[in-house]
Amino acid sequence: MEAKIHPVMAYGVRCADAIACLRQHDHIEQTLLVLYAGIDTMAWLSVPEEESSGLDFQRWVEDYMLSRNGQLLPNVTAADLWGARCGLLHTGAPESRDFRKGRARKLFYTNNVEIIATMPTDIAIVSIENLGRAFASALVWFIDDLEANTAQNQIAKEKLGRTLVTHPM
């Protein structure tokens, strides 16, 4: 008998498939967009409110990606990732409102920068592969927490049921 996969994990697997496809064809910007969108969705699923915020995104990143996978994303903060997400989504550039206000650093990715002799303090370099690994690991811990909290698990499943999917849940 085949074990039934948690719907949040099924969603995460679909994200991972899309990310792998985009990455395989060197669509870096689109890879990152899908990755940040996946994180955004998990942050939304993690809160009982109808809408999630940048603080929810940052809390989810801190709780599930950074605190448990710090070695994958060294010297990167949840605020840096939120800023990178906003810059990429809204302008296609690494500069975000939070970067311009000094609340986040500009992120560059290992496949699109050369070695920089002296790293400015307002820049961090992130491995796309490690960002993806941190997201994948975070999904496992997030699902563990959902399964330990019946009410939140139900909320997440109901919200996920409203997303645009082509596979039955």
Image: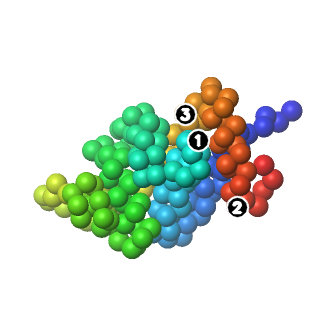
Residue 98 image point, x, y percent: 29, 59
- Residue lying at the far top of the rendered structure: 148
Q: Is residue 88 above or below residue 122?
A: below
Q: CA distance from mark 1 to mark 3?
A: 18 Å
The reply to whether the C-beta atoms of the residues labelled 1 and 3 are less than 8 Å apart is no
Q: Helix, strand or loop at disc 2?
A: loop
Q: Amino acid at mark 2?
A: Leu
Please state, as top left, top right, bottom left or bottom right, where the N terminus lies in the image: top right
Q: Is residue 86 left or right of residue 161?
A: left
The residue pinned by badge 1 equals 48
User: Would residue 45 appear left or right of 5 to someone viewing this image?
Assistant: left
- The residue at which mark 3 appears reads as 141
Can see residue 65?
no
Q: Residue at x 35, y 58 (%)?
A: 83
Residue 99 image-quadrant placement: bottom left
Q: Where is residue 168 drawn, in percent x and y?
A: 81, 53
State the residue at coordinates (37%, 66%). Answer: 87
Q: With respect to residue 80, does 154 lie above or below?
A: above
Q: Which residue is mark 2?
A: 164
